Image (cartoon, rainbow, N blue to C red):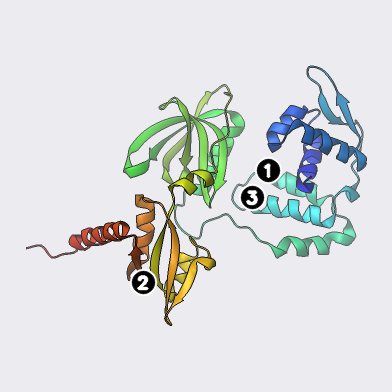
Amino acid sequence: MKVDRLMSIVLILLDKERISAQELADMFEVSLRTIYRDIDAIDLAGVPIRSTPGVGGGFEIMPKYKIDKKVFSSVDLSAILMGLSSLSNMIRGDELINALAKVKSFIPADKVKEIELKVNQIHIDLSQWMGNTHIQPYLEIIKVALQESKLLSFDYIAHHGVASSRTVEPYQLVLKGSHWYLYGYCHNREDFRLFRLSRISKLHIQEKIFTQRDYQKPQLEFKDILTTMQTEIKLRIHMSIMDRVLEYSSYENFSLDGDEYYIVNFPFVENEYHYDILLSFGDKCECLEPQHIREKVKLRIETIASLYKEKN
């Protein structure tokens, strides 16, 4: 039973008049049995929960109940503040400011310094060092469209540089692997699609309000798929790029080769993205095997070199 889920349920119940067990189960992606156990645990902790059966029924906190500030420990409050603060770095808005203010109101006067210290022990900053300057303002635009159920229109650059104009019903903002995505129903493709924000331009909110569709959350976990697609190749790298190679392969896959080089068992998928990764290591990396991947890397290097040959 996760404490963070229990805290989230309490905050949801404080914010809503009533919510069904099924809604909570869908929200946290757990079973109904788990939600019922959580509700019992919250009730035993001293927060009086009332259950209403039938259509339109659900759980609610008893009217006029005032939550005891001692319900949340210092660790609990630190975790909530850390999450809200990291999100507010990237997505601004009155609701986040209000949420931060509400959570801070639970902090006892004698615990302020302790909790501030814990919050500052981990800093999460989702903003980019450099790159596409449209990401943050686009997040704001998409957030408004999500709240008001309004259509979005934009130009999009898909794989292999294919450009198109899209009209999309927004349903989710997704942060995955340091990249932001918009998940929505694309009118052009008549299906749900995941759009990477860095590939979006000319983003606008339309005045038209759309009716929410039933939808499944996007597929974001590809571990099983990648396991079947991945192969392992052998690289010889110079120690000067070890820090970069560690972004893709764990330290256990490295073995010393002399004083300045390493042999690395490198996870690899035979597509343009992974060949580009190898090429990005420049002359500090050599693909040793398998032979057919080594030959394909060599061919790409020769193609690049031909661009720089002097022409008569």
C-alpha gap between disc 3 and disc 2: 38 Å
| In the rendered image, the vertical position of residue 178 relative to residue 6, given as above or below | below
Outermost residue to the front: 290
Marks 1 and 2, how far apart at CA: 49 Å
Local SS, label 1: helix
Say if 244 sits above or below 133 in the image. Answer: below
The residue to which callout 3 is attached is: 87
Mark 3 to mark 1 CA distance (whole Å): 13 Å
Q: Position of residue 261 (x, y in %)?
A: 41, 76
Which comes sooner in the sequence, label 3 or label 2? 3
Residue holding disc 2: 284
Give the residue pinned by disc 1.
Answer: 94
Left or right of residue 309, residue 3 in this image? right
Pick the front one: 41 or 189: 41
What is the three-letter code of the residue carrying label 1? Answer: Asp
Q: Residue at x 91, y 43 (%)?
A: 45
